[in-house]
Image (tube, rainbow, N blue to C red):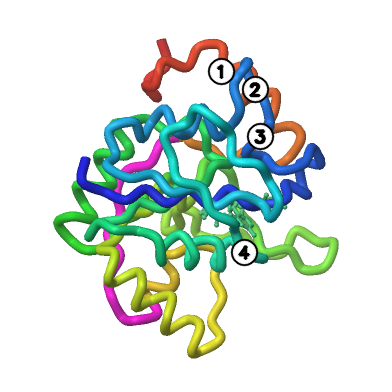
Amino acid sequence: MEVSVLIPAAGKGERLGLGPKAFLRVGGRTLLEWTLAAFLEAAEVLVALPPGASPPRGLRATFLEGGETRQESVARLLEAASLPLVLVHDVARPFVSRALVERVAKAARAQGAAVPVLPVPDTLIRPEGEAYGAALPREALRLVQTPQGFFTALLREAHAYARKQGLSATDDAQLVQALGYPVALVEGERTAFKVTYPEDLFLAEALARVWNGSPQAR
Ligand SMILES: Nc1ccn([C@@H]2O[C@H](COP(=O)(O)OP(=O)(O)OP(=O)(O)O)[C@@H](O)[C@H]2O)c(=O)n1
Ligand SMILES: C[C@](O)(CO)[C@H](O)COP(=O)(O)O
């Protein structure tokens, strides 16, 4: 697939508390190894590692040092990208299917920017102090995932604009939207959840035992 895959993997994993998640082993493989399995057809894979981390041997990827924030890590990965389409995917989402990768790549190739989203399965509220507060219209809301796909030139422009304006965001789509460029939505996958908190390891260990690259339950 003629895309540059950018894997921000330089995070400290502070909420999980077990060090950088890229090297966390689940089901006998690191999260980085699980993640790279979905991108074997990509023409180029670039991975941002924590400062001082030794690049793992035997993996088909180019490694560079990440930055202080996810946004800075992606900016550094972007500098090294050589193809006109990029997919940006968190190493913290190791169980990503090739079907999702292809779905995002297809939409990004057609529209310039695309991200996977999921409906919100729980009631969502805006608390008022310690009180319940107000319920939000969850049917109008979506959970955003990665991989996020973009024309490389568009994402470079978005990061340059963000640097100039002092904008920071939790994902790349927000930076592209800040340029006034529409971001398309495609169906995400609940199995592409982000390993963030200790309890997520129960889910990751269980999924690792049955994961065959497809998000469909047996
Ligand atoms: N300076 C940073 C911070 C985050 N990331 C990456 O961004 C993705 C999503 O971030 P998150 O889940 O928050 O990972 P961490 O930053 O490691 O987690 P925490 O916030 O709990 O420290 C992860 O793949 C992480 O490695 C990165 O490349 N560079
Ligand atoms: C990019 C992302 O995975 C989209 O949902 C999310 O914003 C990353 O958040 P984090 O706090 O950096 O884990």
Mark 3, Cα crowd under 10 Å, few <14 / some 14-19 / many 20+, is some
Task: Please report the residue visible at 77 percent of the width from the left and 68 percent of the height from the top.
Answer: 128
Residue 191 visible from this viewpoint: no
In the image, which residues are magenta?
178-189
The answer to whether the residues at label 1 and label 2 have Cβ atoms under 8 Å apart is yes
Rendering quarter of residue 196? top right
Q: Which residue is mark 1?
A: 208
Mark 4: C-beta under 8 Å from nearest atom of ligand 1: yes
Mark 4, Cα crowd under 10 Å, few <14 / some 14-19 / many 20+, is many
Q: Position of residue 25 (x, y in %)?
A: 67, 25
Q: Amino acid at mark 2?
A: Val
Between marks 4 and 1 in the image, the one whose residue lies nearer the viewer: 4
Query: In terms of sequence position, does the residue under pointer 1 or pointer 2 come before the other?
Result: 2
Task: Please report the residue visible at 54 percent of the width from the left and 81 percent of the height from the top.
Answer: 167
Q: Amino acid at mark 3?
A: Phe
Q: Amino acid at mark 4?
A: Gly
Q: Which residue is mark 2?
A: 26
Q: Position of residue 26 (x, y in %)?
A: 64, 22
Between marks 1 and 3 in the image, the one whose residue lies nearer the viewer: 3
Q: Position of residue 8 (x, y in %)?
A: 53, 52
Tell me how far mark 4 sits from mark 2, CA to CA. Answer: 25 Å
Q: Which residue is mark 4?
A: 67
Residue 214 visible from this viewpoint: yes
Task: Determine whether the residue tagged by mark 2 lies in a helix, strand or loop.
Answer: strand
Mark 1: C-beta under 8 Å from nearest atom of ligand 1: no
Image-based side of 49 in relation to 97, left or right:
right
Query: In terms of sequence position, does the residue under pointer 4 or pointer 2 come before the other?
Result: 2
Tell me how far mark 1 sits from mark 2, CA to CA. Answer: 7 Å
Q: Closest to the observer: 195 or 78?
A: 78
Mark 1, Cα crowd under 10 Å, few <14 / some 14-19 / many 20+, is some
Q: Which residue is mark 3?
A: 23
Tell me how far mark 3 sits from mark 2, CA to CA. Answer: 9 Å
